[in-house]
Image (spheres, rainbow, N blue to C red):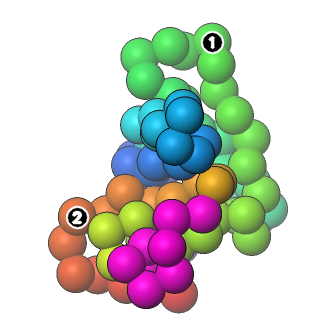
Amino acid sequence: MNRIGQEVLGYWGPMHAYDDGVIVGQDATHYTIQWGDDVVLDDKVLITDMLGEWYLDVEFNGPKIGYWFANTDDMVYN
């Protein structure tokens, strides 16, 4: 599934809260995330490291430090 353009959240814990980002690239194993407006700080993240949907899954599992999809609708990705 092509996720380029998908918004994401990086949750870093209560002291550092979270950052907004967007997926700007992907290959078979990684997403490339651009955080904020900074085009220099791209982050390569393993697809398997994504923890789920922030607005759907976090209420069941609690906020875990890591990477989340920031989908605001009711769509659930597998």
| Residue at the (60%, 69%) spot, across then down | 51
In this view, the residue in front, 77 or 60, is 60
Helix, strand or loop at disc 1? loop
Callout 1: few (<14), some (14-19), or many (20+) C-alpha neighbours within 10 Å? Answer: few
- Residue 37 percent across, percent down from the top left: 41, 16
Identify the residue under disc 2: 72
Dominant secondary structure (helix, strand or loop) of the stretch shown in magenta: helix
> What crowding class fits label 2: few (fewer than 14 Cα within 10 Å), some (14-19), or many (20 or more)?
few
Q: Give the label, 1 or 2, closer to the camera.
A: 2
**Residue that label 1 marks:** 40
Can residue 77 be seen here? no
Of mark 1 and mark 2, the one earlier in the sequence is 1
Residue 67: percent from the left, percent from the top? Answer: 59, 54
Task: Identify whether 12 is placed above or below 58.
Answer: above
In the rendered image, residue 31, in percent from the top left (x then y), is placed at 66, 51
The residue nearer to you, when weighing 57 against 71, is 57
In this view, 77 is above or below 36: below
Q: Which residues are magenta?
A: 57-64
Going 37% across and 78% down the picture, which residue do you hit?
A: 59
Whole-angstrom CA distance, mark 1 to mark 2, is 27 Å
The disc labelled 2 sits on which kind of residue? Thr
Q: Are marks 1 and 2 in contact (CB under 8 Å)?
A: no
Please state the horizontal and vertical placement of residue 17, each as a whole percent of the image.
47, 38
